[in-house]
Amino acid sequence: MRQDVRQGGRQGEGQQARADAPAEPLVGGVRAAGELGLSRGEFARAVQLGIVRAAGPPAAGGAARYALAELDRVRSAEGRPGGEERPGGDWQDALRERVATVGGAEAAAGVLGVGPSRFTRLARCGHLAPVGYRINRYRAVVWLYLAAELREFAAREPAMLRGTAPEADRELMAAKADLRPRRWRGRHVGLLLRRTADPWERAAVLASVLPEEELRQAVPDPAERIVLTALAPPPPYGHPQVPVAAAVALRLLKAEPSEEIHWYRTSLDLALTGARGQSKSTGERGPT
């Protein structure tokens, strides 16, 4: 009995110690980027790709914060891949290589070692997924690609870099197809879904890519639409603020082909089923 009491006392002391322990230090994005030696854009890309994970409640105004332990984890992971010291020992170079992007067909084609026209065909036919975009002065979309992924594609698919285009690509080009927006949306949504397990937040991610009329049909309850709108993710980093450019970019955020819209509507239906079930069982977040 005394032994049980002592054990209980030690457990109680341990619980009290944990309760009294100071909260894990959290820092803002500017300091976190500086700790990792990244520019603002590089850090935003690292967060987008899940390389750096936000922690704790956001700061006033909704800005994400990051644990110092998370920054240590990133430094360790980049400096010692597989537990071994990286050649040269520069973990910052390794991290920058993972988030480096190239924009436009000419720059991306240079990484692949092909001509711009071949690169454009590969991208339009969906062989390469953009990681971001920017709108240039002429209000044209300039797609951004991870340089590391381009190099990996070149090593993995050398036959795609020479010779004639496969029949499927020729058919797509004849139909003037362009899968780049759809491939970017799919990647963007997938990355956002990986960052949350909350059922309503996941439903909001899927709802955010549906055109307004499609969303009204998929979610006829106005109260649910209010919740989904409140939880909708912000536009991705680099989304333009100038109205004329923002109008161009806004079209990229919404699903367009009918089969793509159908996929997101079906996925949203499944997500809402889980979210509604959570609300009924816990009374938390969202209509019941």
Image (cartoon, helix red, strand yellow):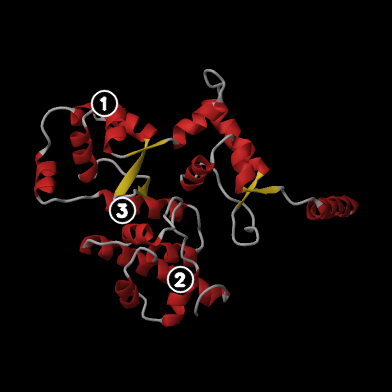
Indicate the secondary structure of the residue bearing disc 2.
helix
Instruction: Give, as a three-letter code, the residue at label 2.
Output: Thr
Tell me residue 6's x, y (percent).
88, 51
Q: Nearer the viewer, mark 1 or mark 3?
A: 3
Q: In the figure, 9 relative to 49: above or below?
A: below
Q: Quadrant of the N terminus?
A: bottom right
How crowded is the residue under tag 3: few (<14 C-alpha within 10 Å), some, or many (20+)?
A: some
Indicate the secondary structure of the residue bearing disc 1.
loop
Q: CA distance from mark 1 to mark 3?
A: 28 Å
Q: In the figure, 137 relative to 280: above or below?
A: above
Indicate the secondary structure of the residue bearing disc 3.
loop
Pointer 2 residue: 229
Between disc 1 and disc 2, whose residue precedes? 1
> Residue drawn at (30%, 40%), measured in percent from left and top?
104
> Residue drawn at (33%, 29%), measured in percent from left and top?
151
How crowded is the residue under tag 1: few (<14 C-alpha within 10 Å), some, or many (20+)?
A: some
Instruction: Give, as a three-letter code, the residue at label 1.
Output: Gly
Q: Picture quarter containing residue 252?
A: bottom left
Pointer 3 residue: 139
Q: CA distance from mark 2 to mark 3?
A: 27 Å
Tell whether 288 sits left or right of 148: right
Pointer 1 residue: 113
